[in-house]
Image (cartoon, rainbow, N blue to C red):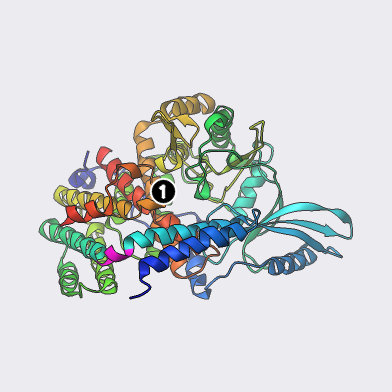
């Protein structure tokens, strides 16, 4: 139903949150967004060669850990992820001739999403005993030594899609799990529930800030984050994106109890071993923040991340029918899904995806600031899917 | 033009798929992914390039329709929107670049109306309906234009490009 603006203007204030205060966002997110604009002109960016990576890592481990006789071997560029430049490598040195298999995950000059490696490291450490996550070996949050922000993780074996399957796609989109779904779906739902049950107040999350409970700040922080990304990078205005921002401000719901949100837990962002199907890692925590759990649920049920069975049933993340997914999540988490808030966060997530695909990805590719510009433009060509979702979701809200 | 653009695009796709990709080691997945995307982009562009001018004309015309709708119903000052609309009407309609620039200029003026100025003046229901109607047309047009990327979960429900242009006409 459409909003009558006179009702909003005359209504008593819901809370002290100014829905149009664009400066109200997490301080570290503000730093990252400001850094993005400041560094944008340093491009273009070229994919790192193996020899460049070896030199960077030799220097890094010598300076940060004082290692001697460092050998960086078996460097292998990793695919996957539409944002970070990733290399597997083996680190050997005087005191470790066998070596450690590690992953360098570093920011190109500009990516499909601009995030903080320090936040990513902290959330990996926080969940180390709760979920399968890669161990954190080292962190250069602002690229002071490596020259670009990076995290170095322990290597994890596993696959993000079945080796033998009927559907594969960019960034996992379009992957079909077929018979694997029965093994993977319960673990996927449990992972969501574990993330939301996590006691973030007891963890070292100094790069994070928490929105005030019982206010609209959780939602407005997200709107401010992503609208800032849009306005900082817009290549071509899109009226629907602008109207969606306005709608999201004017309809922001209260979050009674902020929780840790993964913010990108979907197909392609978990690894499992074959043939058992056991999860070996939950991946891509870069968008994690403290917010409303409905945001994660709404993210997972997006149509772009789902698949259809041969008899026409839509599967959330290619794994499980939507109603069954919602019921199973409620049972696993103890959270009650509010359909109005879920709809709000479906709009927010469609907006976020539109901003990523049509805003940030297009700006990064236009500036030639990424190591895989062609993937950014490929994903950008799917941006209109989210525009139509925005129209449909707002009309139905 | 000989060889023409269609032939050259087809040649590039063939070279990528029959020579370059098979020569790339299986473990060079990033290189293989990017080579496949080059072929995919070329295949889409092969379908699109002859219609690009018409597509940009339709896109600008549709945005001008929204601008006129907002002129009739928006509460905020409309001078800049009127100026941008005049610029769009006067642009070189035989130039893709000029059409794109006109779209950008008018788009910023439309955005300012949607945001309602510094006071965030309320939008009328008529304006909201016009924005949503335009949003749906815009999204359908772009989804149709790019449906060969295979990413759209509902791509089988979309018309082909010829039908898109017939509808716009």
Residue A128 is drawn in which quadrant?
Answer: top right
Which quadrant of the rendered structure holds the N terminus of chain B? bottom left
Estimate the x, y position of residue A343 in percent, counting from the top left.
35, 37
Residue A235 part of the magenta segment = no
Estimate the x, y position of residue A142 in percent, counting from the top left.
62, 64
Residue A302 is drawn in which quadrant?
Answer: top left
Estimate the x, y position of residue A263 in percent, counting from the top left.
50, 44
Estimate the x, y position of residue B35 in percent, counting from the top left.
53, 60
Residue B27 in the figure: left or right of residue A331: right
Which quadrant of the rendered structure holds the C terminus of chain B? bottom left
Q: Residue at x 55, y 70 (%)?
A: A45
Q: Residue furthest left?
A: B72
Q: How many marks?
A: 1
Residue in the foreground of this view, choosing between B159 and A359: B159
Residue B118 appearing in the image: no
Residue in the foreground of this view, choosing between A260 and A80: A80
Residue B132 in the figure: left or right of residue A161: left
The kind of secondary structure element at disc 1 is loop
Residue in the foreground of this view, choosing between A318 and B5: B5
Is residue A201 positioned above or below A351 on the image?
above
Q: Residue at x 18, y 46 (%)?
A: A6
Chain under numbered label 1: B
Is residue A373 positioned above or below B130 on the image?
below
The 10 Å Cα crowd at callout 1, few under 14, some 14 to 19, many 20 or more, is: some
Residue under label 1 = B150
Residue A396 in the figure: left or right of residue A142: left
> What stretch of residues is rendered in magenta?
B49-53
Q: Residue at x 47, y 40 (%)?
A: A296
Residue A14 in the figure: left or right of residue A87: left
Residue A165 appearing in the image: yes
Q: Main secondary structure of the magenta part?
A: helix
């Amino acid at each position: 139903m459409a909003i009558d603006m006179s009702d909003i203007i005359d209504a008593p204030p819901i809370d002290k949150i100014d829905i149009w205060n664009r400066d109200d966002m997490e301080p570290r997110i503000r730093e990252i967004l400001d850094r993005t604009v400041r560094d944008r002109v340093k491009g273009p960016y070229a994919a790192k060669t193996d020899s460049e990576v070896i030199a960077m890592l030799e220097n890094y481990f010598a300076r940060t850990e004082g290692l001697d006789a460092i050998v960086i071997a078996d460097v292998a560029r990793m695919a996957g992820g539409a944002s970070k430049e990733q290399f597997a490598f083996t680190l050997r040195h005087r005191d470790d001739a066998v070596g450690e298999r590690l992953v360098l995950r570093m920011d190109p000059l500009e990516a499909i999403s601009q995030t903080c490696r320090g936040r990513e490291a902290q959330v990996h450490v926080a969940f180390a005993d709760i979920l399968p996550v890669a161990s954190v070996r080292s962190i250069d949050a602002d690229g002071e030594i490596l020259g670009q922000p990076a995290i170095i993780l322990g290597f994890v074996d596993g696959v993000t899609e079945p080796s033998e399957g009927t559907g594969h796609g960019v960034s996992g989109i379009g992957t079909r799990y077929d018979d694997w779904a029965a093994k993977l779906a319960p673990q996927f739902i449990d992972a969501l529930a574990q993330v939301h049950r996590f006691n973030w107040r007891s963890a070292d999350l100094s790069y994070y800030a928490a929105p005030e409970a019982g206010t609209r700040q959780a939602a407005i922080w997200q709107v401010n984050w992503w609208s800032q990304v849009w306005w900082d990078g817009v290549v071509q205005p899109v009226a629907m994106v602008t109207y969606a921002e306005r709608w999201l401000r004017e309809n922001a719901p209260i979050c009674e109890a902020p929780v840790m949100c993964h913010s990108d837990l979907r197909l392609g962002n978990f690894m499992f071993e074959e043939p058992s199907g056991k999860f070996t890692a939950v991946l891509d925590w870069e968008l994690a923040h403290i917010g409303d759990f409905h945001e994660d649920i709404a993210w997972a049920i997006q149509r772009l991340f789902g698949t259809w069975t041969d008899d026409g049933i839509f599967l959330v993340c290619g794994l499980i029918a939507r109603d069954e997914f919602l019921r199973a999540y409620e049972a696993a988490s103890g959270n009650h899904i509010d359909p109005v808030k879920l709809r709000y966060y479906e709009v927010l997530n469609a907006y976020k995806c539109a901003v990523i695909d049509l805003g940030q990805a297009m700006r990064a590719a236009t500036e030639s600031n990424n190591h895989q510009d062609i993937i950014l433009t490929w994903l950008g060509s799917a941006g209109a899917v989210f525009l139509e979702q925005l129209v449909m979701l707002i009309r139905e809200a | 033009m000989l060889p023409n653009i269609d032939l050259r695009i087809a040649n590039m796709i063939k070279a990528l798929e029959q020579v370059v990709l098979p020569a790339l080691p299986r473990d060079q997945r990033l290189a293989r992914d990017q080579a496949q995307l080059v072929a995919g982009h070329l295949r889409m562009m092969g379908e699109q390039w002859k219609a690009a001018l018409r597509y940009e004309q339709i896109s600008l015309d549709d945005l001008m329709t929204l601008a006129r709708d907002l002129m009739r119903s928006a509460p905020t000052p409309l001078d800049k929107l009127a100026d941008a609309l005049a610029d769009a009407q006067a642009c070189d309609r035989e130039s893709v670049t000029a059409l794109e620039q006109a779209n950008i200029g008018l788009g910023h003026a439309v955005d300012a109306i949607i945001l309602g100025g510094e006071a965030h003046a309320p939008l009328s229901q008529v304006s909201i309906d016009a924005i949503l109607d335009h949003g749906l047309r815009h999204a359908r047009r772009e989804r149709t234009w790019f449906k060969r990327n295979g990413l759209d979960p509902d791509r089988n429900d979309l018309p082909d490009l010829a039908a898109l242009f017939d509808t716009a006409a």
